[in-house]
Image (spheres, rainbow, N blue to C red):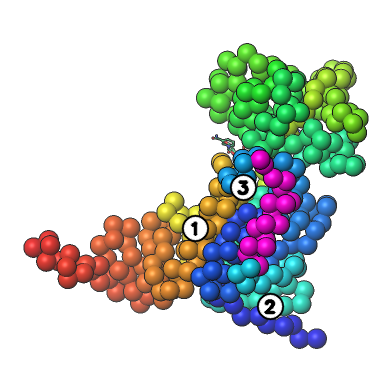
């Protein structure tokens, strides 16, 4: 059977805070966005709504003075995007072709053609894959196990208790340091005797009296009870094989994140870890008309509110591009939908056939004279 072809001006992939904010803005700008989100799949860690769907209390999203549950917040985002006419399609995208506009997205049943594409596919926290780590009811995920100290560290359950952070990179140092604001003690459990974290982050952690390092050690199990949540971790020394239980009230897994960018490999510029590269001045990727927002292009802040902020930017960038206005590229140039490039110093426009014309209005010329 022939595949259905859908033609749109704006397609958004991903339905976390970034994707849904892009949808709210694009829909209000009358661009009739189509938002494609991945179906729920526990193994692939995907769920419409993104990472907040596996979070409980969200206390740092502005506008909710008493906090809100992650899934409830995402439901609000979704209803707002729906209210302005966002069209939703829940399906896997198998392949994309970004070599020319309209860009093409291939799903099992459709070929989607679009003039602009907003990528908001997010990133997934990496997990240890050990007993006790899974989400309630299989494990203690959401009941003492977390991958985000900024999100969960300030919860009352963790105050003045002993906590464990797993990992030896910058994230682990940052999470451990942050958690000392609330916890009585933070153990950093690392599988080697050297940290991967930058010198400055290491020093900060070493100087913090509440942080204790547990070297050459793996966490092999998270233990607890359904009522109390996490009560401890089982540790194994990697050289001696010796095992012991370290009592704690919470475990923060900080062993890295994986941006969800496999679909775009070889078509969009990425850093060495796989995060999409965007311009400092916009959400533009290296392919004109393709924009990226949220955690898929942010390895540093990774917050719902910063993702929502870049989602808004991506929708505005997309709108500008469709309106024939120049949009900043990662190279510092700007480009229009017709392929005209404005040089980084804004002094010239290079036409698609290679001609260079001065970028001065008559007003500016007369001011210069
Ligand atoms: P990294 O990949 O840098 O570090 C991951 C850490 O987790 C490593 O120490 C690694 O151990 C350990 N690890 C990985 N897998 C396992 C496992 N299965 N079991 C036990 N330990 C494991 O990730 P980060 O998230 O820390 O940082 C990612 C990037 O983001 C980096 O470029 C970092 O600099 C940047 N970043 C910057 C920040 C800032 O500047 N404020 C804050 C946070 C991140 P091993 O060392 O043995 O490989």
For the stretch drawn in magenta, the main secondary structure is: helix
Q: Are marks 3 and 1 in contact (CB under 8 Å)?
A: no
Picture layout, residue 208 above or below residue 19: above
Seen as rendered, the residue at the extreme bottom is: 1
Mark pair 3, 2: CA separation: 31 Å
Residue 233 lies left or right of residue 355; in this view the side is: right
Look at mark 2 in the image and give the residue it sits on. 111
The stretch drawn in magenta includes residue 80: yes
Residue lying at the far left of the rendered structure = 369
Of the two numbered discs 3 and 1 on the same chain, state the one appearing first in sequence: 3
CB-based contact (under 8 Å), mark 3 and mark 2: no
User: Mark 3, mark 2: which one is toward the viewer?
Assistant: 3
* x 62%, y 27%: residue: 178
Of the four image quadrants, the one with ligand 1 is: top right
Is residue 51 at all visible to an observer of this figure?
no
Circle 3 sits on which residue? 304
Q: Which mark is residue 313?
A: 1
Distance Cα–Cα, label 2 vs label 1: 27 Å
Q: Earlier in the sequence, mark 3 or mark 2?
A: 2
Location of residue 350 by image quarter: bottom left
Asked whether, in this view, residue 82 is left or right of residue 364, the answer is right
| Residue 270 coordinates in the image, percent (x, y) | 56, 53
Alpha carbons under labels 3 and 1: distance apart: 14 Å
SS class, disc 3 = helix
The percent coordinates of residue 63 (x first, y second) are 58, 47
Name the mark nearer the viewer: 2 or 1.
1
Question: For the magenta stretch, what is the residue range?
Answer: 66-82
The N terminus lies in quadrant: bottom right
Establish whether ligand 1 lies closer than 8 Å to the Cβ of label 1.
no
């Amino acid at each position: 059977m022939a595949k259905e072809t859908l033609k749109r001006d704006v397609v958004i992939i991903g339905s976390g805070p970034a994707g849904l904010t892009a949808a709210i803005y694009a829909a209000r700008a009358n661009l009739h966005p189509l938002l494609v989100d991945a179906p729920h799949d526990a193994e692939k860690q995907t769920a419409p709504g993104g990472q907040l769907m596996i979070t409980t209390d969200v206390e740092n999203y502005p506008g909710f003075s008493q906090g809100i549950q992650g899934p409830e917040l995402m439901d609000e985002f979704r209803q707002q995007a729906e209210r302005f006419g966002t069209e939703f399609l829940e399906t896997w995208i198998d392949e994309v072709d970004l070599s020319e506009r309209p860009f093409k997205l291939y799903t099992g049943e459709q070929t989607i053609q679009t003039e602009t594409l907003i990528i908001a596919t997010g990133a997934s926290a990496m997990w240890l894959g050990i007993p006790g780590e899974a989400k309630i009811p299989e494990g203690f995920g959401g009941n003492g196990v977390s991958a985000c100290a900024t999100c969960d560290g300030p919860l009352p359950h963790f105050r003045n208790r002993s906590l464990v952070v797993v990992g030896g990179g910058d994230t682990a140092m940052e999470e451990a340091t942050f958690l000392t604001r609330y916890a009585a003690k933070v153990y950093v459990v690392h599988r080697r005797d050297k940290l991967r974290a930058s010198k400055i982050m290491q020093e900060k952690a070493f100087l913090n009296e509440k942080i204790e390092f547990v070297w050459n050690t793996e966490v092999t199990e998270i233990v607890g009870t359904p009522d109390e949540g996490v009560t401890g971790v089982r540790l194994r020394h990697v050289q001696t094989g010796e095992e012991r239980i370290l009592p704690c009230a919470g475990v923060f897994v900080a062993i890295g994140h994986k941006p969800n960018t496999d679909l775009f490999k070889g078509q969009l510029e990425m850093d060495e870890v796989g995060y999409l590269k965007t311009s400092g001045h916009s959400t533009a990727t290296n392919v004109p008309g393709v924009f990226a927002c949220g955690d898929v292009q942010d390895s540093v802040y990774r917050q719902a509110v910063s993702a929502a902020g870049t989602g808004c930017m991506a929708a505005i960038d997309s709108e500008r591009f469709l309106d024939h206005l120049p949009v900043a590229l990662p190279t510092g140039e700007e480009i229009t939908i017709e392929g005209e490039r404005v040089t980084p110093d804004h002094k010239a426009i290079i036409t698609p056939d290679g001609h260079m014309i001065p970028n001065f209005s008559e007003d500016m010329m007369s001011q210069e004279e």
